[in-house]
Image (cartoon, grey):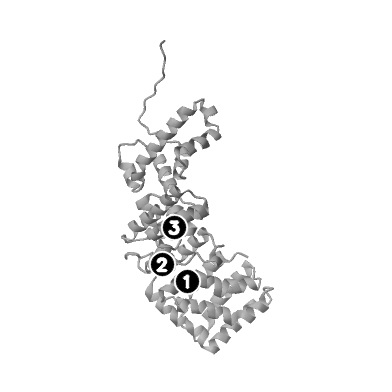
Amino acid sequence: MAMELDVFVGNTTIMDEEVYQLWLDGYTVNDAVKVRMEGGVLEECEASADVLLSDTMDQYRTFQMCERLLHSPAKLANQLLFQIPPHRQAVLIERYYTFDDAFVREVLGKKLSKGTKKDLDDISAKTAVTLKSCRRQFDNFKRVFKVVEELKGPLVENIRQHFLLSDKLARDYAAIVFFANNRFETGKRKLQYITFQDFAFCAGQLINNWTVGAVDNMVEDMDVDLDKEFLQELKELKVLITDKDLLDQHKSLVCTALRGKTKAFNEMEANFKNLSRGLVNIAAKLTNTKDVRDFFIDLVEKFIEPCRSDRWTAADMRLYLTHYTNSAHILDTFKHQVVWDRYMGVVKSCIFKMYHD
């Protein structure tokens, strides 16, 4: 009996975005088929289960063959094996490098080494992200880190150009690289409420204001290493708490500005000296690598927690830190305004982001 077949021949690589996401999420072929069946694809396409299995396997093979190109995204545009339109290439790359916030939060600030990779089983169980997906994400972090550490110029721009990522995703990767390089502590229990996006915002502030690149934009590691000269200058700020007259004068100026503007005024006045000592001591210790690592835990313990226990609102915090910073400019004998503004500008921004009332 003769059979009639309709055959279509084309050279554009067919890629189903839903199947691609299932592959990225670490689903096996069989599990991906189940998900597709539950989504009603058989009825939609009037296909059999065998055809669906065959299609899924075929697409998984294509993704696996593309993966080595995705490790160096520029190669994807220049290869001839897969005919993929530019807009689809951009989607494949962006999705491949996208990560789960729950996963990155577990590895943020850790060394991107074999030691951390051994912990991926536990992280997978804790975050409900499949082990295969955890490995892909971890390897992506490591790959980006290794490429950009050799480059001069702005970190975000280097990531964007070499990995062809969107500006937002490039900024997130810059934060991951920056945290991994400086080994900031993010895993302590009292920091668990701080989201990856909160930390990414803080990383942007630190990169733009405290790194070597904030002063010289064409040096190696310019956006990764903190400016050692600046960290040394921060020690000069100690005069704000060691000189009793300056401390009293600073307190008087801040309290005069705050009186009648907040319900938390009594607590602000009573705790001024402790809070000021906390912030200035954090600054003075940043020449030590360990104290750099503890920067966020110190902000929480020395400033955010005392304010939270006194029931300050986010508006109270903003009001207090604004006057605390600005009043230092009126102090007669305080000569370190430039360093003070560079320090407090970042500290204020980070505290505002981390203070959830």
* Residue 291, picture quadrant: bottom left
Marks 1/2: CA–CA distance = 10 Å
Q: Residue 182 carries which label?
A: 2
Q: Mark 1 points at which residue?
A: 294
- The N terminus sits in image quarter: top left
| Helix, strand or loop at mark 3 | loop
In this picture, is 218 found above or below 243?
above
| Helix, strand or loop at mark 2 | helix
Q: What residue type is labelled 2?
A: Asn
* Residue 330, picture quadrant: bottom right
Question: Of callouts 2 and 3, which one flags the residue occurring earlier in the amino acid sequence?
Answer: 3
Q: Of 1 and 258, which appears nearest the observer?
A: 1
Q: Of 299 and 266, which appears nearest the observer?
A: 299
**Residue drawn at 42 percent across, 34 percent down:** 57
Q: Name the residue under label 3.
A: 119
In this picture, is 268 found above or below 77?
below
Q: Position of residue 55 (x, y in %)?
A: 43, 31
Q: What residue type is labelled 3?
A: Asp
Q: Where is residue 14 in the image (x, y as percent from the top left)?
A: 41, 33
